[in-house]
Amino acid sequence: MEPARRQSVADVALEAGNIAVDAQASRARALSGLRFWDNVYRWLTRCAAIGVLAILGGVIVSLFIGSLPALREFGFSFLTEQRWNPVTEKFGALAPVYGTVVTSFIAMLIAVPVGLMIAVFLTELCPMILRRPIGIAIELLAGIPSIIYGIWGLFVFAPFLQETLQPALITIFGNVPVLSALFEGPPYGIGVLTASLVLAIMVLPFITSISRDVFEAVPPVLKEAAYGIGCTTWEVVRYVVLPYARVGVIGGVMLGLGRALGETMAVTFVIGNAHKISSSIIAPGTTISATIANEFTEAVGELYTSSLIALGLILFVITFFVLAAARYMLLRIERRVG
Amino acid sequence: MASLARPALYASRRRRNFIAMGLSMTATAFGLGWLVLILGVLLWEGFSGLSLRVFTEMTPPPGSSGGLLNPIFGSLVLTFLAIIIGTPIGILAGTYMAEYGRHDRLTSVVRFINDILLSAPSIVVGLFIYEVMVYPMGHFSGLAGSVALAVIVMPVVVRTTEDMLNLVPNQLREAAAALGMPRAYIIARVCYRAAKAGMITGVLLAIARISGETAPLLFTALNHQFWSIDLNGPMASLPVVIFQFALSPYKDWQQLAWTGALIITFTVLALSIGARALSARK
């Protein structure tokens, strides 16, 4: 009995030792496995983050390569020439660039004051219960796809303008020396002005929602102090809220401008697609994005395609700087608040 | 007393305030008016064409009747693929920015670039995919269309993932780390679970964003007249069909365009309201 028992105790001890060693080994294995997957995941996420940068780089590089033939052929005159002739293969970007800038400018002229006033209403006047619903309703305007604005603009808004606003503008300004040139020509309905108005409606929600957010970030103490010395609501907005939120508001406006510059479908429907610069804002025109959308699939020949891609590159560069400026300004106000 | 001492000034300040506040109310009515007007016209024009046939028949040749089955199917396929491609990359990038590299330089650069991509013109994305996929492959394809949409999905998902993970309280991470969990497991088992509602909201918003996108599809997926499930060939999608039909001179096509517009708009609005409800519930 005795020796056998002693032996078995030794066995048990040996076994336990083995198990301990095994456990330690499997523990080490498990740990190294965990460490391995942790590293894999860290690298995977890092690569994805770098991938975002790579996409931006890819966009710039591919557009640049695609536009090389046109840039080589026309050089700097691509930016300064107005001609756009697929038959003789002479292309210049001036008319679309002009159209893009003018439509966005008129759109901002309308959308900025209206958007700011809506933000004032939402932060200062609106009863608490209505704030969320009205805010959401305005933001839904931003959710409607741009093609819907296009089809609505073409079938409903343009005929309406043709019968009401445009004849009125022509008769009012017809005899005013400088302004008459702005409203020259027959009321087609479609044209630069119509596109600008549709754009204004589309960027309105962006301006409103960002202005509202920066208005809400104004410290209540400042407003209360102003109200306390007897300021009216308008004076509080004008002399306290707006100066404090200025950088953020400009950021929001630039963001809206970035949207307006690149907007494609809605503009394509209502601008009229005429490759010429005219002084009248009710005449048909074109923008960079509308030109690309209309002509790209039908473009034959390397030079034609390449010219359209060069237009895309110009658009991307312009919007890149506008959006970068917008982000920089919004970042500044975020830092101040946070 | 001061106001009574200078009644003219007091009255003019009150008048100015009255005018400004009146203008701000008018502006709000103006903004809301467009929403009502657009949705109203859409319902009025689109509803009359809405029938079962729209969902069961192919797009017709001009002059005859038909439905929108192939573009609806095409849109669903393109959107689904775009989400499958774009969401994982977006979530991974957002995870890096919020978890591993919260304070490093790469994160701030990526955040800046991502915000720019978020509002970059979508037609440029179409040109980009044309250059890198359609042109080398030699033909338009549904696959190229869904990659173009995925490029639009990604920044939306990156942004919401990062924001939502940043909202997860640090105590949760510390508690999990104290139990000996490695970083990747903390992220997968704790952080994702805590941020789930917000991340789903982001994906819903991304779907809403791309289901109406037309510009990037014009020269990637192009269009297709008939039933096609071949991802390697051109594919019909609802927005492109609306674009083509609305600009055509045929009454039947225009009617179908309105009906398609109605379907898209209410899908998009339902998605964005759903996303809001999901994020507000928490």
Image (cartoon, helix red, strand yellow):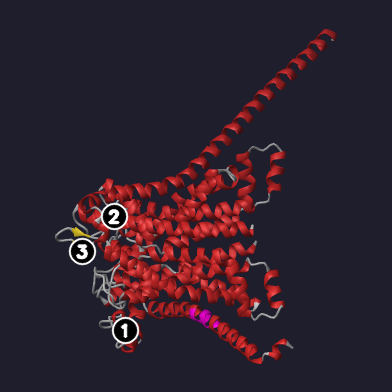
What residue is shown at x 51% (from left), y 40% (from top)? A44
> What kind of element bears circle 2?
helix
Q: Residue furthest top?
A: A3
The amino acid type, in three-letter code, at marker 2 is: Ala
Q: Quadrant of residue A297?
A: bottom left
Tag of residue A83? 3
- Check disc 1 and report the residue beneath it: A162
Mark closer to the chain start, 1 or 2: 1
Q: Quadrant of the N terminus of chain B?
A: bottom right
Q: Nearer the viewer, mark 1 or mark 2?
A: 2
Q: Quadrant of the C terminus of chain B?
A: bottom right
Give the x, y percent position of residue B89.
48, 47
Q: Is residue B27 magenta?
A: yes
Q: Is residue A269 visible?
A: yes
> What kind of element bears circle 1?
helix
What span is colored magenta in the figure? B25-30
Are labels 1 and 2 on one chain? yes
Give the x, y percent position of residue A159.
32, 82
Q: Nearer the viewer, mark 3 or mark 2?
A: 3
Mark closer to the chain start, 1 or 3: 3
- Check disc 2 and report the residue beneath it: A310
Label 2 marks a residue whose chain is: A
Q: Residues within 10 Å of mark 2 (few under 14, many from 20)?
A: many
Q: Is residue B50 visible?
A: no
| C-alpha distance separating marks 3 and 2 | 15 Å
Q: Residue furthest front?
A: B5
Tell me: B175 left or right of B193.
right
Q: Quadrant of residue A163?
A: bottom left
